[in-house]
Image: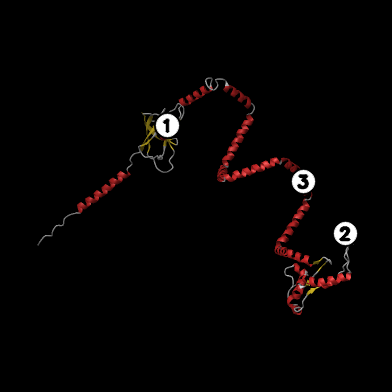
Amino acid sequence: MKSPTPVPRRRPILGFGVVFIVAALLVGAVVVLWPTGKERHLTAYFTNAVGLYAGADVRVLGIRVGQVTSVNPAGTSVRVEMKYDAKRKIPADAQAVIVNQTLVSDRYVQLTPVYKGGGVLADRTTLPVTRTVVPVEVDDVTGSLNGLTKALGPEGANSSGALSRLLQVGASNLSGQGEDIRGTIKDTATVLSTLSEDRGDITATVENLRKITAALAANDQQVRSFTDHLSGVSGQLAGEKDELGAALQTLGPTLRNVTQFVKGNRTQLAANVRQLAQVTSVLVKQKDALGQFLTAAPVGISNLSHAYDPISGTLGTRADLRQFKNPAMWICSLAFSLGSPPKQCEAMLAPLNKAAAGINLNLDLSWITALTTTYDPVLPPKDAYGPNSKGGKTTSAKSAKTTTSAKQGSTNSNKTLGGLFPGGTP
């Protein structure tokens, strides 16, 4: 009997590989997650570092976050090494400022501004002189005051006593004016406060002025022409100032009289204005009829001049009774104007229209005018045509009447009052 072939053992090798991979991952995680340090370092260059020593505070908003480690000269500037807590976030664009608490105490470095988001200042960053600030030294202040004193002293502006006289005159002028000066300062503060509150409106006003200026510049030729014309008008008014003054003197009493009249009759004027408003309202409502009248009136007046007979002093007329062509409608409209109800009125009176259909009511009454007219012309005086004239000749009333009758028969038949309107019956 044969024994089975042995199978190679691979489990130890596989287990070792798994352990190696897990260990590598743990090492990587430790390298990545392990903190690199509890502090960060910063180097800054200052133009000077008077009163700043190693061990001085590094602060943010006045709170200590680190300390200065070294202060060393570096050419024309001072190299300052600092360290601060790594958990403190400093903005990437931060500046370093040396702050003196008092004139005699040590100074500290302030990192500003405070972090509000964005990039963070990296470790081992170096700030150049352009990103650092140092305080003004007392020696500089006293030197400036000394220079100012010399400039204003006997060796300077007051060499001839001018500054002394200025102070004396100023003291004399300001003596007793304390209350007024205080009021002026208060009013100035109020004005500045008002301007500050209305700065938006002031900005808009300035912008509008800019636009107006641009428009004037774009229309320079027209502006020049306007000013030339205005100059001419001003010259003409200056030449006629006497007449203008007289006119204004006359206009003054007239305006006073008008004012007195208006004051004395304001009640009547108010009533007249109200009535005028009513009249204009009626005119507006009847504007179509008014327009038709204004169109037909000139033609009617022209026809009226032709219908007038200057010899007899009469009008040749012909009655045009159009309403009798539809008597039912005329009677119903008359009844309606008197307050009667218009229902079924026209239907009840419809037979009247048929009865009046063949009746011609265009009546020529010119023959009555001719028969009833008496002609009695007034003769001109005997000397109307000169001292040797015999005067005018008269004609008998009978012959004049006969002649006029014939004339009226042939002429007045074409002259009618109906011609006053374009729609008159021929």
* Left or right: 233 as drawn, with respect to 375: left
Which residue in the structure is indicated by mark 1? 108
Decide which of 331, 93 is in the foreground and name it.
331
* Left or right: 14 as drawn, with respect to 405: left
Quadrant where the N terminus sits is bottom left
Query: Looking at numbered disc 1 in the image, what kind of residue is underneath it?
Result: Tyr
- Colour mode of the rendering: secondary structure
Do callouts 3 and 1 mark residues in contact (Cβ within 8 Å)?
no
Sequence order check: which comes first, mark 2 or mark 1? Answer: 1
Q: Label 3 vs label 1: CA separation?
A: 87 Å
- How packed mark 3 is, by other alpha carbons closer than 10 Å (few <14, some 14-19, many 20 or more), is few
Look at the numbered disc 1 and give the secondary structure of its residue. strand
**Residue 38 place in picture, x, y as percent:** 35, 38
Sequence order check: which comes first, mark 3 or mark 1? Answer: 1
Asked if one can make out residue 414 in the rendered structure from this viewpoint, the answer is yes
Q: Nearer the viewer, mark 3 or mark 1?
A: 3
Decide which of 275, 229 is in the foreground and name it.
229
Q: Label 2 vs label 1: CA separation?
A: 134 Å
Sequence order check: which comes first, mark 3 or mark 2? Answer: 3
- Name the residue at 78% across, 68% down: 417
Decide which of 39, 308 is in the foreground and name it.
308
- How packed mark 2 is, by other alpha carbons closer than 10 Å (few <14, some 14-19, many 20 or more), is few
- Name the residue at 43% across, 30% down: 107
Which residue in the structure is indicated by mark 2? 384
Which residue in the structure is indicated by mark 3? 254
* Image vertical order of residue 310 relative to residue 236, above or below: below
Q: Quadrant of residue 194?
A: top right
Q: Nearer the viewer, mark 3 or mark 2?
A: 2
Do callouts 2 and 1 mark residues in contact (Cβ within 8 Å)?
no
Q: Label 3 vs label 2: CA separation?
A: 52 Å
